Amino acid sequence: LPPGPAQHGRPERVGEPMHVRELESQRGVRVDPRLLRRTRPDQDRARHLAKQLFTRPDERILVTTFTKNLAVDLERHLRDLCGPEFDRIEVKNLDDWASQFLRSRGVKVPLAPDAKARKRRWQHCASEQAPDSDRPWSFYADEWDLVAASQGVADEEGYLRARRAGRGTPLSRAQRKEVWKVLAEYRSELDSHGLMEFADVVREARLILERRGNGESLL
């Protein structure tokens, strides 16, 4: 994966080593050394790719993480692990990379507001579309993050087909339709204010690369 618009050559991406929710829980705190140890296979792979397969000066390896703290620690460990090939390895937080990638192509990235504002928006959408439901606003937010946004769901039919593994609470088809009303209201709220969430940013970056024929090596 080329880390920026000036980079060329055959792209390669080292995949995410851990589950999103596990990484999200690390936002704002120092990364547990045990998490770093679990990324060692990915570090070894990045080194192998840079040293043995993608060896031209214009070829780069991008290692992505879901957290900035993990990216900083991974970069330090890779620097110690690698030799000269480290100069062609870049470690980036995925959100930051996707934002930078879009901006480099003239795409505006108006990110949604902070967590408090997001909570208020979800509460409003739930009260508007599901006033009689006993589900908390956080259920809809998690359903959006872990099911709809993560699978690129854009409409009710897509949500009815979406996988919900690990969500714990099974939903019938009729219940999904009710939940979708809240999710669709939230999406409409974002669109009406011209806002994007990080999942939107990553998706837009993927779509651009797919149009270039590189999407399968990015995400």
Image (cartoon, rainbow, N blue to C red):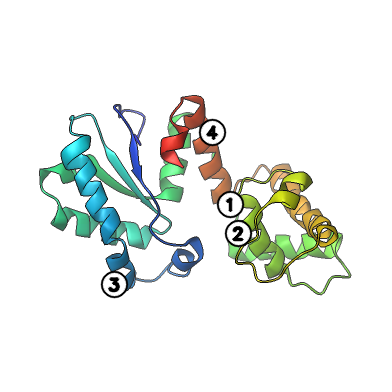
The local secondary structure at tag 2 comes to helix
Q: Kindly identify which residue carries mark 1.
A: 150
| Amino acid residing under circle 2 | Leu
Task: Measure the alpha-carbon separation of dots 3 and 2.
Answer: 26 Å
The quarter of the rendered structure image containing the N terminus is top left
Residue 26, position as x, y percentages in the image:
42, 69
Query: Relative to the observer, which residue lies in front, 198 or 139?
Result: 139
Question: Marks 4/3: CA distance?
Answer: 34 Å
Label 4's element? helix
The residue tagged 2 is 146
Residue at mark 1 to residue at mark 4: CA–CA distance: 14 Å
N-terminal label among 2 and 4: 2
Distance (Cα) linking label 2 and label 1 = 6 Å
Q: Quadrant of residue 36?
A: bottom left
Q: Which mark sits nearer the N-terminus, 1 or 4? A: 1
Q: Secondary structure at mark 3?
A: helix
**Gap between marks 1 and 3 measured at Cα:** 27 Å
Placement of 51 over or under 71, stated as above or below: above
